[in-house]
Image (cartoon, rainbow, N blue to C red):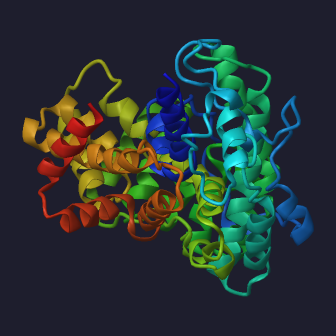
Amino acid sequence: MRNISKHRVVMIVAAALALLIFAFIAWRLGWFGVSPAKPETESLSKAPSFAQPKVSDAVANLTPPSARDGNGAANREPPPPGKRGDKETEITQTELPESQPQEVCGLTTAEASAFFASHGTVNMPDVKPVLAEVVSRLIESDDLREKTLGLYIVARQAGMAAMEAERLNYPGCKSSEACSAKPYEAMQQALPTNAAALVNLALTTGDLDVYSAALSACSGAATGACSDVSAARWAEMEPDNAVAWLMAASEADARKDIAARDAALRRAVTAKVYNTRLPSMAPIITSDSVRSLPPLVQASMENAAFGDLMMRPKQVTDGLMRYCVQSKQMVGNRPETCDALATTLLEKDETLSAAMTAAAIGKRVGWSKERLQAVDDEISVAVGYSLSLAASPTGLSCDSLTKLNEFSQKMVLIGERAAVRELVNSSGKTLAELAAYYRKKGG
């Protein structure tokens, strides 16, 4: 029983720290509603001006709020498997016998025992100073892409911190509308102020990459500074980019403008380019400050810096999902539109979330079993490989964490699905064979 308990803690902690795909899947399966978006904005030339925040003020947003017990929101204890109070999931220091110490990279045996006894809340490395240092350099950079990334991280982290703070008011929340929606609403309220500098940069430069980043940072919020950018305006500026039209469709759907949503989706079908224009995280991943960190700290850093990117797939596909999956009838040209856009997602988007969305739509429009199975195999390989490391007896050893970090970093640098393909190629097996191997291994 003790070994099972330790095994579960390793799975919870390692997966939470080092596997971003879990966050994507969890979010994709439990999206909240989208706040109404403001219709089309005025031209860039009429954009208001915002004061550039001081670097010290900006990076302060990277510090998450304190929980009731004084621990940061990012370090709060995750709910253990099974019932609370169940003897199998209550892990105390005495339940980790010295004869079988559990290794945690960078921690002594005693520190590792306390780490597991607290479900990973004690002795968790504090990555905020390192992240703040990296982000400060980015904001001060003369390179537009680096500055955009720094401001983007600040805005998104502030929103996520507000959401985590609000969640503390609803312990144990599962399905109540009030407790599930309030954290998302808190994030939406926090975003406009913190995204103002990035919105201003987008409007003053007219750069499409910066504009896209500002939209993503606002994450559907439509008040304050965020009311001055819209996906509809992006689609006007870049009419041949399918992503802009997909986001415009989600934006229209959120304000219940069905005609505008359907028109945007039709434009997305004929668009020749698929470019998310998301800011690259490479400057953070490849920075000396991050590469020199111990594996456990790197894992925590990746989760802190990149976890918010799970919000972007929602902005791109929310309207499409409502049109293709949640609609009661598939009439007229709807099946053909849905089939075409699902194919676009599957062929041109490198996120596993997009592949999952494509499969959900494909199932509705009658894709073959083989085509749907290939998507399921990709997910099985990504999750199976990570769990094979995280759930092993040495799941938090330096070797296991290093491999997990390498995989999650590769997912960010070359794309999630590209990282899976590379993993398959190096295995000497086909995608189907490797997926079957991990399914069998996972029981």
* Residue depicted at 13% across the width and 48% down the height: 432
* Left or right of 57, for residue 283: left
Name the one closer to the observer, 278 or 20.
20
* Left or right of 112, for residue 355: left
Residue 228: image x %, image y %? 71, 55
Residue 279: image x %, image y %? 56, 68
Say whether residue 391 is visible.
yes
* Residue depicted at 62% across the width and 43% down the height: 220
Name the one closer to the observer, 336 or 75.
75
Residue 107: image x %, image y %? 68, 55
* Residue depicted at 79% across the width and 56% down the height: 62
Label total for image: 0
Say whether residue 271 is visible.
no
Above or below, 415 against 30 in this view is below
Above or below, 390 against 107 in this view is above
Of all residues, the one furthest to the bottom in this rendering is: 142
Residue 98 found in image quarter: top right
* Residue depicted at 49% across the width and 67% down the height: 277
Name the one closer to the observer, 42 or 351.
351
